[in-house]
Image (spheres, grey):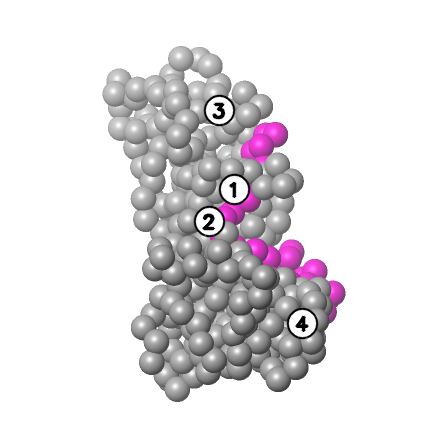
C-alpha cells in the first residue's frame, strides 16, 4: 500500500498530477493498494520514486529504509510475566504493521531523536483516498512513500484506545497527551489489550514494591510533601525509607506551576504517578514531565482522566 507522509519542517519535493486524469490516478492508487512493497511512477515521468515501505519493528516503532521512527508519548506495556510480555509485544507490533498497510499517514517530527537515534514523531492518518500526492526522501536518499499534512486522529490515539500501548508523556504536546490519557482510561476500564493484565500495570501505593524494575502506574493518597535540597518528595506512607515516593526537581515543579501545567500538591490529595519504578529508599518514581502525575477522584463513578491542572477540591 502506498502511504502518504508529511515531515514537519522539511522541504518537500512536489510534483503535479493535474494532467493525469481522475481515472488514471485512481488506477495508480489501486495498484499501490494491491502491492504493499511496490514502486510506482506516480509522477508519470518514467522515474520510480517509492523504493521502501514502512515496517513495524516494535509496538511503538517502525522504519522506512535506513530511518527508524518512534511514536512519541507512548510505550509498550511493561509486564512482569515474560509470556504475557512476549505475546503483548508481538501483538502490538502486528497491530502496528496492519495499520501501516491499510492507512495513508503523515508524520510530524517533534524536534529530536532519542538516545538510540530514532526520530520521535506523531503520526496522523486517514483511511480514505486523498489526492494531491507529494514526495520527499528519508535520510537514506531513497523514496519512502510520502504525503503532505494530514489532519485528524493520530496513530497514538488508535493504539492507546486498543490497549496496545501505554501513555508515556515526554513531549510538549500537552493537549495530545491529555486526549491519550482519556483513551487510556477507557481502555483500562474495558480491560482492552494489555490492560487485561491490569494488576501488574496499575497498582496501589502499598503494592508499588511489586513493580520494581518496570514501568507502572502507582496510585494512592499523598501523606506528606517535602522540599529538601532542591528536590520535592511526595510520600505515600509513614516511613519514607520504605514506602512509595514520587520525586522531582523543585525547580521543575515551580516552573510547571507558573505555566499552569500542574496544580499545587498537598497532603490528602489522591494522585497517580506513571513511570519506571526504582528502589530508592523504598519504591520510587522520578517525574520529569508534569503529565506523569494524575489527580484521582475515586468517588466519581463516571471518572475520566483529569490531569493535575484540574481545580483542587
**In the image, is residue 99 above or below residue 136?**
below
Q: Which residue is mark 2?
A: 171
Q: Secondary structure beneath disc 4? A: strand
The picture places residue 141, in percent across and down from the top left corner, at 54, 20
Give the magenta-colored segment's residue range.
64-90
Q: Nearer the viewer, mark 4 or mark 1?
A: 4
Query: Residue at the location (69% across, 76% down)?
Result: 241
Circle 2 packing at 10 Å, graded few (<14), some (14-19), many (20+), is some
> Of label 3 and label 4, which has the lower sequence position?
3
The picture places residue 223, in percent across and down from the top left corner, at 53, 82
Q: Which residue is mark 3?
A: 137
Q: Which residue is mark 1?
A: 120
In the rendered image, which quarter contains the C terminus? bottom left
The residue lying furthest to the right in this view is: 82
Circle 4 packing at 10 Å, graded few (<14), some (14-19), many (20+), is many
Residue closer to the observer: 250 or 99: 250
> Of label 4 and label 1, which has the lower sequence position?
1
**In the image, is residue 179 above or below residue 205?**
above
**In the image, is residue 6 above or below residue 97?**
above
Q: Are marks 1 and 2 in contact (CB under 8 Å)?
A: yes
Side of 127 relative to 78 (left or right) = left
Specify whether residue 141 is in view: yes
Query: Residue at the location (53% across, 67% down)?
Result: 227
Amino acid at each position: 500500500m502506498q502511504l502518504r507522509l508529511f515531515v514537519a519542517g522539511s522541504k518537500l519535493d512536489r510534483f503535479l498530477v493535474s494532467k493525469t486524469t481522475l481515472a488514471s490516478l485512481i488506477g495508480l492508487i489501486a495498484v499501490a493498494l494491491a502491492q504493499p512493497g511496490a514502486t510506482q511512477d506516480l509522477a508519470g515521468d518514467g522515474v520510480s520514486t517509492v523504493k521502501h515501505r514502512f515496517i513495524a519493528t516494535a509496538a511503538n516503532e517502525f522504519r522506512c529504509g535506513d530511518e527508524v521512527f518512534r511514536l512519541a508519548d507512548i510505550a509498550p506495556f511493561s509486564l512482569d510475566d515474560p509470556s504475557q510480555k512476549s505475546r503483548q509485544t508481538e501483538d502490538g507490533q502486528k497491530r502496528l504493521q496492519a495499520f501501516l498497510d491499510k492507512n495513508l499517514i503523515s508524520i510530524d517530527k517533534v524536534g529530536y531523536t532519542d538516545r538510540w537515534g530514532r526520530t520521535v514523531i506523531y503520526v496522523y492518518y486517514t483511511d480514505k483516498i486523498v489526492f494531491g500526492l507529494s514526495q520527499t526522501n528519508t535520510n537514506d536518499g531513497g523514496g519512502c512513500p510520502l504525503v503532505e499534512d494530514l489532519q485528524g486522529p493520530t496513530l497514538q490515539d488508535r493504539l492507546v484506545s486498543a490497549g496496545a500501548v501505554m501513555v508515556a508523556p515526554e513531549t510538549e504536546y500537552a493537549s495530545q497527551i491529555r486526549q491519550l490519557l482519556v483513551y487510556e482510561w477507557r481502555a483500562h476500564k474495558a480491560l482492552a489489550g494489555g490492560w487485561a493484565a491490569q494488576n501488574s500495570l496499575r497498582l496501589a501505593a502499598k503494592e508499588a514494591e511489586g513493580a520494581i524494575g518496570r514501568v507502572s502506574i502507582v496510585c494512592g493518597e499523598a501523606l506528606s510533601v517535602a522540599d529538601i535540597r532542591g528536590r520535592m518528595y511526595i510520600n505515600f506512607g509513614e516511613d519514607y525509607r520504605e514506602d512509595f515516593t514520587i520525586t522531582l526537581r523543585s525547580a521543575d515543579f515551580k516552573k510547571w506551576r507558573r505555566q499552569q501545567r500542574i496544580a499545587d500538591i498537598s497532603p490528602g490529595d489522591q494522585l497517580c504517578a506513571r513511570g519506571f519504578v526504582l528502589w530508592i529508599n523504598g519504591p520510587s518514581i522520578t517525574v520529569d514531565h508534569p503529565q506523569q502525575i494524575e489527580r484521582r477522584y475515586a468517588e466519581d463513578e463516571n471518572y475520566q482522566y483529569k490531569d493535575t491542572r484540574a481545580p483542587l477540591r
